Amino acid sequence: MAIAKKAAIEMQFNWIFIIIAGAVLLAFFFIITQSQRESSKINADLKILQHTDTVLKNIEQSSLNSDSTIVTLGFPKTAFQISCGEVSELSIQDSGYAVSLKNQAVFSPKNLEGSKINAWIVNYNIPYKVMPFVYLTAADRLFVFVNDSNSGGKVEQLFYEFSANFSSVLVNDISSVPEGYDTYVYVTYSTTSNTPNINPSNPKYLIIHIKPDSGSDYDGVGNVQFYKTGEAVPHAGFAYLKKESVFGAMFSEDGNFYKCTMEKVFTRAKYVNTLHADRAIAIQKNMTNTVCEPVYVWPVYYLHEMKSMNFSSMPDYYDNLIKLEKGNKDLAKLSCPLLY
Amino acid sequence: MKPRNAQIQLGESTAAIVVIIILIVLGLVFYSVLSRSNVDDKKIEIANLEAIEVASFATAIPELHCTFLGAASANCFDAVKVANFSSLLSSDTDAYLYYAEFFKNARISIEEVYPGNASWLIYENNKSVRQSELPVYIPINLYYPLDDDYSFAVLKVVKYS
């Protein structure tokens, strides 16, 4: 009787031992699997970010051979966040990983989600190159060019200069706009009116109203007004310079994102202008040709003036650019070293 | 005194557990060694990529490139721009910090090969603890606008990592 009882206790003890050891082993392998899962997610996030970063870092090289390049970034469905301000970066949502966009001109919505992101890289030539612009968007955004009577055919011209790789339509009347997109960007143009003549009914839209300065057009200088869904008055209005900045406004999340990116562009432009001015001075100083030498005086003055101009003084900036272009042509006619 | 049956069984079970634990520990050590070598490979790959990115940026920026009526000429650097850019980065801290965002920890220089032998140090930042140097050499044309003449040169980008 006593022996049988002892055997039963031994059996029970063995089973308890097996269960505890089994549980410990199971927990161990569970923890290993979980950490592997997390690390493969981190690896995937890092790879996506690294790939995107490499593309963005190489835009200067890509833009060297062509003024307009399209890059399609494909990866597993990913949610990106793009910020511009004190911190300018591109990050993957909830991952904690980001790459800096501090000195890059990236025009984009703040949130980009999808398995395919389209990047359009365009040189900002004013007419000399300042830096490449990167326009980012996902497939859920439709660009609607409103070719109404106010636009005088300019919206149609802008539409044909816009990249065919993005979802876009040219309409006379916004009632014929296709449905099924998450965000609609309406582009309107008027030389006389500060306000767009449309009232979209989409749940999420952005209106970019272009109003050029007198005698100019969308590829010159003027103002862009930004209206978000339901806004009767624009939440922001800023200057534009050349069509590349108009496209920048169309791809930006809102007016503030556009302003922030354009300020970064003008920081780079300040250094480019400084170098052009210093180069013109160096050439002028060492110039033995008495025909060429006086032609540099005014361009150097304009370039120096532009160094202290910022994003808010676009019309003066544009005037100086026109004068510089003329100066450069004069130098070309005289076979003198060019400004740019 | 002879060990009892139960003691023997307990001893066997404990030995089995110890053997399993040793096997698991060996497996973990092997795995971590493999992972570390993967991480080292990744570090080298990233360093190489960064060196190419910096070299690629340096060869393409309008601050250095030859242009003719706004159009850039491939692999051509303007000697006056090179000299001015070098002096801008050495005299203007804001400009240096601005371009440091692109050039990072690197040394960028241009050495004329033929017919002259001029050289310019464009940028240098070796403040990080240096473990390795990855040099990238790119042959370029150097354009002298005043003489309307060209010479051969080498753009040398040394990426510190």
Image (spheres, grey):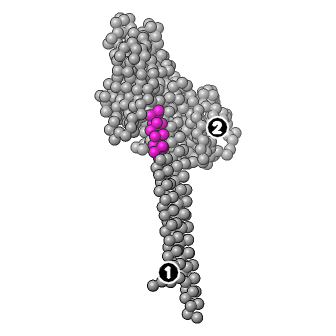
Q: Chain of mark 1?
A: B
Identity of the residue drawn at 45% across and 21% down: B139
Tell me where residue B97 appears, x and y as whole percent: 35, 35
Residue A309 seen by the camera: no
- Is residue A78 toward the left or the right of residue B64 in the image? right
Contact (CB < 8 A) between labels 1 and 2? no
Q: Are marks 1 and 2 on the same chain?
A: no
Magenta stretch: give its range. Answer: B39-53
Residue A114, x across and y down, in percent: 60, 46
Residue at the left extreme of this rendering = B91
Q: Of the numbered discs in the image, which one, if any, rests on residue B103? A: none
Assign a secondary structure to mark 2.
loop
- Look at the image and tell me whether residue A135 can be seen: yes
Q: Mark 2 falls within which chain? A: A
Please name the amino acid that badge 1 sits on.
Answer: Gln
Up-down: is B14 above or below A147? below
Disc 1 from disc 2: Cα separation: 78 Å
* Residue topped by disc 2: A167
Q: Which residue in the protein does label 1 denote?
A: B7
